[in-house]
Amino acid sequence: MPETDYYAVLDVSPSATQSEIKRSYRRLARKYHPDLNQQARDQHIKLLNEAYKTLSDPARRATYDQQRLIDASRRKAAREALRQQQELAKQEPRMTWIEGIFGFIKELRRELREP
């Protein structure tokens, strides 16, 4: 669900109160309203409205926060898995015990041939 960070869109912290969210929304809506700002994009005001709609409703906000936590933990797990893969790629390839025995025999033969 949360692809965009609604807290960043509204320029508030995740621990913001309802009044802080409302105040920030009104300030930004005035700033980016197409009637007051000729360079304002319609897409930005739509995103602002969506963020305010989600964060102003306590039930939606709780769902959004829970989804943010899930997404953050998934991203963290993916980064950790990628880091582990990179570490494994840096390591020397491991050989099986059969390859080790054959390598040992080759080295032993080579040593026996050389006086």
Image: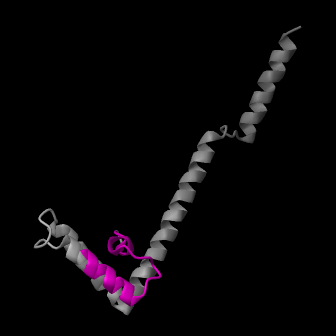
Q: Nearer the viewer, residue 9 or 24?
A: 24
Which residue is drawn at the image coordinates 57% and 58% (left, top)? Answer: 80
Compared with residue 16, is residue 84 higher up or lower down, i.e. above or below?
above
Q: Is residue 78 visible?
A: yes
Q: Nearer the viewer, residue 74 or 68?
A: 68
Q: How is the image coloured?
A: one colour
Residue 37 picture location, percent across and down: 15, 68
Q: Is residue 1 left or right of residue 90?
A: left
Q: Nearer the viewer, residue 71 or 91?
A: 71
Q: Is residue 87 left or right of residue 37?
A: right
Residue 79 picture location, percent across and down: 53, 58
Q: Which residues are magenta?
A: 4-28
Compared with residue 50, is residue 4 higher up or lower down, i.e. above or below?
above
Residue 100 picture location, percent across and down: 76, 35
Q: Is residue 41 left or right of residue 24?
A: left
Which residue is drawn at the image coordinates 48% and 64% (left, top)? Answer: 75
Name of the residue lying farthest toward the right: 115
Q: Quadrant of residue 4?
A: bottom left
Q: Quadrant of residue 115?
A: top right
Compared with residue 108, is residue 3 higher up or lower down, i.e. above or below?
below
Which residue is drawn at the image coordinates 33% and 88% (left, top)? Answer: 56
Whether 23 is among the magenta residues is yes
Name of the residue lying farthest toward the top: 115
Whether 67 is among the magenta residues is no
What is the magenta segment's predominant secondary structure?
Answer: helix
Q: Quadrant of residue 29?
A: bottom left
Q: Is residue 1 visible?
A: no
Which residue is drawn at the image coordinates 44% and 81% (left, top)? Answer: 65
